[in-house]
Image (cartoon, rainbow, N blue to C red):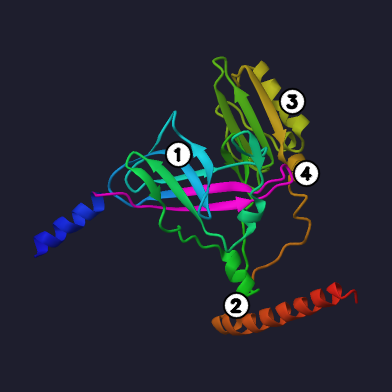
Amino acid sequence: MLALFVATKSYRRKAGIFVRGSFSIGSSRACNDDYITNVILENLKDRAVTIFAIYLKVGHNYYIEVENLEDKPLILRAYETYQKEFGPIEFYGINSNRINLNDLLKNQKIKKRLVLSTSDGRYKVPSNIRRWNPVWDFFRNHMTAIVRPVHSTYKEKYLGGNIKYVVEFTDDNGNEEIVPVHPRDYELKIFRNFNLTKESLESKEALEQLLQAQIENGNLSCKKYVVHDLQAWRKISHEFYSGGTIHAEYYGAFQYHVVGKVVTKYSDWKLKRENARRSQGK
């Protein structure tokens, strides 16, 4: 019986197709039509699936072509996940006509599901990937805080908030090297043949002068270099975060689950009342 159970499980793991999927529909000021913004496919079988096209079936009779893969079929390997982002469209076309699908795409009562053209024929994606987002917790409890890290990167190299300059060196072969410079790097030896000085880190121009002098003295070998001042960049890119710094406080289970929900219900009721007054012109 145990051998039969294992053999059955192994057969079911490899036989047939089982692909889970999800999609998102959005809109943009760049076009007049709602469009598919994101598609995720997850292969739950221990065998590859060849996909020639991805469609979104709307209602009973509309098939929106999400991605045509006839020229280069998608090989979704065992337990592999495929994700693709899509941008705004010009319009939807059918034969020689345009077609407006906005009313159907916006209608939550009309069923929509992904359909795949595979080497085994048509496959209707049976279930959605159950994705979770903390935003849903926030709407139920306003004490929920969603904190996102703000990164600064340059050519795929992460830079911390304390980095003052980035120096980009290029050698005679065209190879590039990115060197982040901390305001206190004069205390360390980050270059092999010379040290930075405290005065050289006071401004971008002072650092450029020091590097140029080291090149002329033969202590630094490079074809060219560029110094980027991150302070000037941060003034522009961090303009959105103009508020003060919030110091996170710990909330216990009672505060979050009981007090938080009570405050949320009161806030929702207050907002609903204000919206009702505005709709009545009061």
Q: How far apart are marks 1 and 4 (CA)?
A: 43 Å
Q: Earlier in the sequence, mark 3 or mark 2?
A: 3
Which residue is found at the position 84% from the left and 73% from the top?
279
Q: Give the labeled residue for mark 4.
A: 236
Range of residues picked out in magenta: 15-40
Residue 251 is marked as 2
The amino acid type found where label 3 is placed reads Gln
In reply to whether residue 27 is colored magenta, the answer given is yes
Q: Quadrant of the N terminus?
A: bottom left
Q: Give the labeled residue for mark 1.
A: 53
Nearer the observer, disc 3 or disc 2?
2
Q: Local crowd at mark 3 within 10 Å, few (<14), some, or many (≥20)?
A: few
Q: Local crowd at mark 2 within 10 Å, few (<14), some, or many (≥20)?
A: few
The amino acid type found where label 2 is placed reads Tyr
The amino acid type found where label 4 is placed reads Ile
Q: In this view, does 62 lie above or below 189?
A: below
Residue 209 is marked as 3
Tell me the SS state at disc 4: helix
